[in-house]
C-alpha cells in the first residue's frame, strides 16, 4: 500500500514527495518521458525572494536557508536590474521598492549591462541578491530523497482514472492503491481534481514564452544581471553564453504542451530592442511554459477541507522553484499535524480551505 501517491513529477511533486517520504511510502507518477518536462523544465531559474504576493514572499524567504545549505547549495550569483524611461518614474519607483532595489545611475547600469541605450534609459535600480538556481540538480536531489526512503519516481505514467472509496485507486500504466493522493499536476491540477471527484479550485494556466538569442555584440554575458522593464512587461537573462528574452506575457490557455506564438515573441523582442544598442539579428531557439494561478494568485497547499486524503500542491504561478523547500515543508506539516513555522496568516492564505 502506498501512503502518498503524488501525481506530477515537476518541482512541486518531487519536493512534496521528498518531505512526505519521511512519513510513509511515496510513489510519484509523471506522465511524460522525463521529470520536469513542462513548467519546471522551462523556468527562468532565478531566486528572487521579494518576487510575488505576500504569502509567496513568505514561502520564498522561508526557503532561503535550504537553497544555501542543502546538498552544497543550489545558487550562484546573478543580480537583478530594473530600467525605465522618462515617462515611467512612478511605476519604476513602485517596482524598485517592492523588489528591494537601490537606484543607480545610467552609467552604473551600463557597467552591469553594456549594451543599454543611454538615450532611452532614464532610471535604473539594482540589487545583487537575485541568484541563479540549479533547477535540474534540485529536482534530481528531491527524487533521490524519495528513492532513499523506499519510494518510487516513475515516468511515462499518464493518469487516466481516479477512484476513491476507503482508499484511492489511480490508473496509469497500471492501477496504484494509496491512502492519500497529492495533486501536483501543474496546469492539469483541476483536471486531476475533477477526475478524482474533488471540486476544482478555478486554476488558470497562462502561457509565458522565451527566446534564446546570441550574446549581444559577441560580448561575454556571463556576469550580466537579469534585466527587466517596469511592470515586468519583458525581461532578459544571461544563460549558457546566450541571452534569454521573454515578453513576460500571461495569456490564459487550456492545459497543454505549450508552444510559442510568433507574434508574441516578436513583440517581446521589440520591447527588449527598444532599450539596447545591439539589434537582434538571429534567434537560436524558443519555447513556452504554463504558469498556473488560483483566482487569488496564491499557491494552494495542503489537504482538501472536504476530502483530507486529497492533498493540493498547486497554483505555483511561476514561483515553484522559489517556494518549493518551504511549500513542501508546509504540506508535510499540515498532513502530519505539526505546527508550521510560517505565520498563521500566511498559512491560512495558502490552504485550499480559503477557496471553498
Image: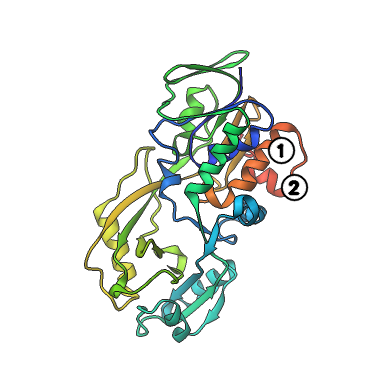
- Residue drawn at x 77%, y 40% is 339
Residue ranking furthest to the right: 339
x, y percentage for residue 223? 45, 71
In this view, the residue in front, 65 or 48, is: 65
Where residue 315 appears, x then y in whole percent? 52, 42
Q: Quadrant of the N terminus?
A: top right
* Marks 2 and 1, how far apart at CA: 9 Å
The residue wearing badge 1 is 333
Visible in this render: residue 314?
Answer: no
Name the element at disc 1. helix
* Residue 212 as seen in the image, left or right of residue 24: left
- Residue drawn at x 24%, y 54% as measured from the top left: 262
Could you tell me which quadrant the C terminus lies in?
top right
Which residue carries the number 2 mark? 341
Is residue 80 depicted above or below 14 in this figure? below
Of 316 and 140, nearer the camera is 140
- With respect to residue 198, does 95 lie above or below? below
Q: Is residue 255 visible?
A: yes
- SS under mark 2: loop
Q: Are marks 2 and 1 in contact (CB under 8 Å)?
A: yes
Amino acid at each position: 500500500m502506498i501512503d502518498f501517491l503524488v501525481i506530477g513529477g515537476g518541482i512541486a511533486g518531487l519536493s512534496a514527495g521528498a518531505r512526505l517520504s519521511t512519513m510513509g511510502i511515496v510513489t510519484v507518477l509523471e506522465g511524460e518521458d522525463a521529470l520536469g518536462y513542462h513548467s519546471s523544465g522551462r523556468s527562468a531559474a532565478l531566486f528572487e525572494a521579494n518576487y510575488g504576493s505576500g504569502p509567496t514572499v513568505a514561502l520564498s524567504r522561508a526557503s532561503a536557508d535550504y537553497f544555501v545549505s542543502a546538498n552544497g547549495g543550489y545558487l550562484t550569483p546573478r543580480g537583478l536590474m530594473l530600467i525605465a524611461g522618462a515617462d515611467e518614474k512612478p511605476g519604476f519607483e513602485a517596482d524598485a521598492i517592492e523588489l528591494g532595489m537601490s537606484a543607480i545611475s545610467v552609467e552604473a547600469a551600463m557597467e552591469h549591462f553594456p549594451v543599454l541605450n543611454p538615450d532611452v534609459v532614464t532610471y535604473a535600480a539594482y540589487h545583487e541578491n537575485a541568484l541563479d538556481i540549479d533547477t535540474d540538480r534540485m529536482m534530481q536531489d528531491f527524487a533521490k530523497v524519495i528513492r532513499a526512503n523506499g519510494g518510487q519516481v516513475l515516468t511515462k505514467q499518464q493518469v487516466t482514472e481516479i477512484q476513491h472509496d476507503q482508499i484511492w485507486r489511480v490508473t496509469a500504466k497500471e492501477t496504484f492503491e494509496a491512502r492519500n493522493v497529492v495533486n501536483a499536476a501543474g496546469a492539469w491540477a483541476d483536471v486531476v481534481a475533477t477526475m478524482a471527484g474533488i471540486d476544482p479550485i478555478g486554476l488558470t494556466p497562462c502561457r509565458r514564452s522565451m527566446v534564446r538569442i546570441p550574446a549581444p555584440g559577441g560580448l561575454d554575458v556571463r556576469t550580466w544581471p537579469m534585466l527587466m522593464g517596469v511592470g515586468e512587461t519583458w525581461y532578459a537573462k544571461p544563460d549558457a553564453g546566450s541571452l534569454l528574452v521573454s515578453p513576460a506575457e500571461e495569456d490564459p490557455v487550456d492545459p497543454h504542451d505549450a508552444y510559442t506564438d510568433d507574434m508574441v515573441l516578436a513583440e517581446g523582442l521589440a520591447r527588449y530592442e527598444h532599450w539596447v544598442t545591439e539589434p537582434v539579428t538571429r534567434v537560436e531557439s524558443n519555447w513556452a511554459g504554463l504558469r498556473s494561478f488560483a483566482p487569488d494568485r496564491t499557491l494552494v497547499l495542503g489537504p482538501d477541507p472536504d476530502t483530507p486524503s486529497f492533498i493540493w500542491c498547486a497554483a505555483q504561478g511561476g514561483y515553484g522553484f522559489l517556494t518549493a523547500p518551504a511549500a513542501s515543508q508546509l504540506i508535510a506539516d499540515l498532513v502530519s499535524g505539526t505546527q508550521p513555522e510560517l505565520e498563521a496568516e500566511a498559512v491560512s492564505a495558502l490552504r485550499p480551505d480559503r477557496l471553498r
